[in-house]
Amino acid sequence: MVQLSAKDQLILDALTSGCVRTCARLISRIERGEPGLVELLRALYMAGGSEKIIGITGPPGAGKSSLVAKVIGVLRRRGNRVAVLAVDPSSPFTGGAILGDRLRMIGHATDPEVFIRSMASRGRLGGLAKKAGDVLTVLSAMPWDFIIVETVGTGQSETEIMHYAAVVVLVQTPMAGDDVQAAKAGINEISDIYVVNKSDHPDADRFRRQLEAMVGLGLRLEGDRLWRPPVVKTQSLVGEGVDELVDQIGQRFRTLAESPELSRQRFRHRLRHRVVEIVREMLERDIQSGNGMLPDSRLEPVLAREKDPYELAREFLSGGT
Amino acid sequence: MVQLSAKDQLILDALTSGCVRTCARLISRIERGEPGLVELLRALYMAGGSEKIIGITGPPGAGKSSLVAKVIGVLRRRGNRVAVLAVDPSSPFTGGAILGDRLRMIGHATDPEVFIRSMASRGRLGGLAKKAGDVLTVLSAMPWDFIIVETVGTGQSETEIMHYAAVVVLVQTPMAGDDVQAAKAGINEISDIYVVNKSDHPDADRFRRQLEAMVGLGLRLEGDRLWRPPVVKTQSLVGEGVDELVDQIGQRFRTLAESPELSRQRFRHRLRHRVVEIVREMLERDIQSGNGMLPDSRLEPVLAREKDPYELAREFLSGGT
C-alpha cells in the first residue's frame, strides 16, 4: 500500500471531493517536473474510477478547439461535469501553448462544472507524454463525468498521449482537392470514431465517402463481433452534428462497459504505453541527476569500446550490473 | 565479443572500407525497423573511431539546408569526405521528409565523396531518435572525415538527436522585430556554436548583439577554463561567413581532442541519452510483440487497482518480477 504524508493525504481528499484549485496547483507541480510526487500519484491512481477519457486529435486547422467547445456544451446540457486537458506540442524555438487558451475564449470559462487546462512542452526535453499521463491520473481521481484530452497530433508525444484515452476521436477536414490522409500508422489504428468537420465544404461528401471506404477496409475484430468505427459529419462552428458525435462517444463507452474482455484488452494496451513513458521518464531523470543507474564507471567500458551501448541497454532491462 | 554471421561480417567489411551502396541498404533496413540488426550494430559500434558528428539544428525557415550545402562545399574544398543525415520530423497526418531532398537539389549529388540521406518518422510511433542513433553508428564506422546530422528541431525526438553530436551548431535568423528566442532549455544547453543566418537582414545586428549577450550569461565551465560559444554571422545563400563557421567547428573539435576530460564528459552525456533511447525502443518493441516483459499477468493487479503503474515501472528497472 501507498503511505502518504499528512499533506499529501489532504491533497488526495481535496481532489477526490472535486476541489478545482487543488487540482490546478498539483498540475502546475507536475508541469514543473517537481520531484517527490510519485507517492501522491500512486495513491491517486488507486483512487481512480472507471475509464472516462475521451481523446480528440487531428491535424492543425481541422477545427478541433471549436469542436471540443461544442462537445463540452452538449455534455453540460446533459448534466455532465467535464475536465479538458489540451496538450500543445511546442517547438523548442517558438514556445507556447495556445489550444487551451483558444478553448477558454470560446466559452465555458465561468462554468464551475468545467475545468480547462493546457499543457505544453515549452521546449523542455522529453516527458510531455509522461506528464500528460500524470495529469490524467489526477483528473481521473476526481468526480468528473468525462475527461477530454485534446492534442494537435503532429508529433510523437502527442500520438502517444492518444493511447491513454478510452475512446479516441480523429477529426479531419476536407481540404480543396485533398484526398483522405488518415491512413497513417499510429493514430488510425487507435481511432474509434472519425469526424469530418467543416462538412459544408464542397469536397466534404467525397471526403467522407473516401473515409468510409478506408474505415471499411480496417474493420476490427473485437471480442466476437466486428467493429466498424462510425464516421460523423460536423460543422463545429455552428454545432451541427455535435449531438450525434456525443451520442457515438456515449455508445462507445457503453460498448466497452458491456464487453469486459474488450475493456480489459484496451486497458492493457493503455497501461503498456503508460509504463513505457514512466520508465523513460525515470531513466531521463536518472541521467539528469548524473549518478544513479548509469554512473561513470558503467560507461567507461563503452567509452573504451570494450562494450557497446546496445549491450549496456540490455543489461539495464535485465537488472544486471 | 560480438559474434557475427558470415553475411553480417561481409557488410561490416564493406562499410569499414567505405562502400556507400552497402551503407544505403543498411540504413533502409534500420528505417524499416527490421529485427535482427543488433549484433551488426554492436560490431559497427566497436569498429567506430573518433567522434566526428556535427549537429546542425534550428527553427524551420532559418536556412539550415542551404547552410549545410555550403558547409559541405567548404569541407570538400579542404579535402574532407562528408556524410549527411537529414532527419525530418513528420506529422502522422502530413507525412514526408524533405530536408534531404532539398539538400540533394542544392548540389553535391554527383560527388562520390559526399553521402546524403534523409530520414523521417513517417507517422510511425516512436523510435526516430533511436533509429537516427543507429544510422549514426553505421556512418561512424565508415571512413568519413565528418558526419553532419541536420534536424529542424521542432519536436522532442529531434532535440534528442542533437545530443548525439560531438559539436552542435544552432542556426537562427533575425525575423522582423523578433527578439532572440533561443534561450529555451534543451537545445541551448548543448549548443557549441551559434549562427545568425541571413545576416543581411536589417535586424541582424540587433539580433546578434542580443544573442551574444545571452550567450555571455551562459558561460560554461569546461574543465579548468570558461567556454563561451562563438556567434558566427552567415549568409548561407551566397556562402558568406561559412568558412569562418567551418573554422569554428574545427576549433571546437581540436578543443575536444586536446581536453581528454572534457571529451569523456561529453561522451558520457551522449552515451546516457543513447542508452535511454535504446531502452525505450526495446520496451516499445516488447509492447508491440504483446508478450515478453509485460505479459497480461503482470498487468492484472494494476487493472484491479491493487498495484499502480508507477510501481510496475519501478519493478521493471530494478529487474524485479
Image (tube, coloured by chain):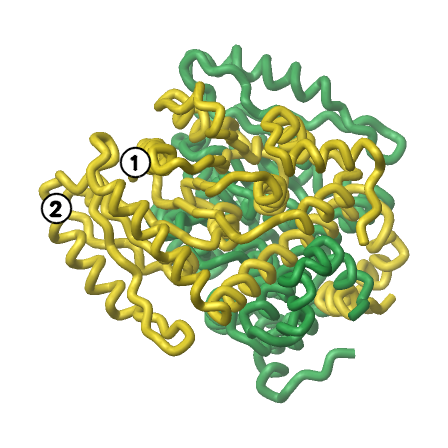
Chain colours: A green, B yellow
Q: Residue most toward the left? A: B202
Q: Secondary structure at mark 2?
A: loop
The residue pinned by badge 2 equals B203
Disc 2 chain ID? B
The residue pinned by badge 1 equals B63
Task: Look at label 1 and name its amino acid.
Answer: Gly
Q: Which comes sooner in the sequence, label 1 or label 2?
A: 1
Q: Secondary structure at mark 1?
A: loop
Q: Looking at the image, which residue is at 79% across and 50% down?
A: A268
Q: Residues within 10 Å of mark 2 (few under 14, many from 20)?
A: some
Q: Residues within 10 Å of mark 1 (few under 14, many from 20)?
A: some
Task: Look at label 2 and name its amino acid.
Answer: Asp
**In the figure, is residue A238 to the left or right of A41?**
left
Cα distance in 3D space between marks 1 and 2: 16 Å
Disc 1 chain ID? B
Residue nearest the observer in this picture, B99 or B21: B21
Q: Is residue A248 at all visible to an observer of this figure?
A: no
Give residue B223's mark.
none
Q: Residue most toward the bottom? A: A6
Residue nearest the observer in this picture, B298 or B229: B229
Q: Looking at the image, which residue is at 64% across and 87% down?
A: A5
Discs 1 and 2 share one subunit:
yes
**Compared with residue A183, is residue A294 higher up or lower down, i.e. above or below?**
below
Query: How many labels sit on residues?
Result: 2
Q: Nearer the viewer, mark 1 or mark 2?
A: 1
* Residue B19 location (% of width, % of height): 62, 29
**Compared with residue A24, is residue A246 higher up or lower down, i.e. above or below?**
above
Q: Quadrant of the N terminus of chain B?
A: bottom right
Q: Looking at the image, which residue is at 41% across and 59% down?
A: B190
Residue nearest the observer in this picture, B165 or A135: B165
